[in-house]
Amino acid sequence: MTTPIGPVTTVPKSRAFSLMELLVVIAIMAILAAVTMPAINQVLQSTKLSTAGRSIVDNLNLARQTALSKNLPVEVRFYKLPAFTSPSSAAPTTYRAMQSFLLNDTNAVPLTKPIFCPEPIVFSDNTSYSSLFSNSASKETAADSYSIPGYGRNYAYRSFLIKPGGATTLASDAFVTLTRENTSPAQGGNFVTIQIDSLTGRTRTFQP
């Protein structure tokens, strides 16, 4: 007796993408990347700017607290270094680092390692936005015996002192502004301005 054979079910083969379909997908991905990358880059730059601002404020607060607790003056330095894209041996052109030193009877003791701004964040050297860098507030000084990691003595700096009571050597309140390299707040770019109270050494931060 012959057993009847039922209908055979065939599984359809999956169809491969055609060249045209692949090109369309690639084009869509390219468009999405072109649209989203500027926004992502802007977020990253804003994050770097905020992080740099917090680091500078933290270092200034540490300098003030150390002056008060140790009853000794603290020197706050802002370093001019070669540009980000230049070799470390190039001429210093850009303010983009800071450091504080406890001044005792014999020498200057670093409170921390130098605080470097992340690329492309720098201190604006326009005195309209960084009054601390004006000649009336501070003098640009050539490198001394202290060596900065990665740069040695290839730097210049401006500085002020925080006295044991918290007051500073600044004649009036001063401020520094962090912004992207080759931009300024006047161009509508994002920025962080840090104000230093000359009488108390306290800081205030302004960011749009």
Image (spheres, grey):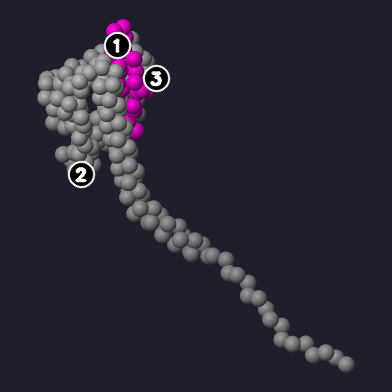
Magenta range: 98-119
Q: Label 1 belongs to which residue?
A: 104
What quarter of the picture does the C terminus occupy?
top left
Q: Label 2 belongs to which residue?
A: 208
Counting other residues with Cα less than 10 Å from the Cα at mark 2, is it few (<14), some (14-19), or many (20 or more)? few
Distance from label 3 to label 1 (Cα)? 23 Å
Q: Position of residue 190 (x, y in %)?
A: 23, 41
What quarter of the picture does the N terminus occupy?
bottom right
Instruction: Report the residue at 42% width, 57% height from top.
Output: 29
| Outermost right residue | 1
Q: Earlier in the sequence, mark 1 or mark 2?
A: 1
| Of marks 1 and 2, the one in the foreground | 1
Secondary structure beneath label 1: loop
Q: Position of residue 44 (x, y in %)?
A: 34, 43
Counting other residues with Cα less than 10 Å from the Cα at mark 1, is it few (<14), some (14-19), or many (20 or more)? few
Secondary structure beneath label 3: loop
Secondary structure beneath label 2: loop
The type of residue carrying mark 1 is Asn
Q: Which mark is residue 149?
A: 3
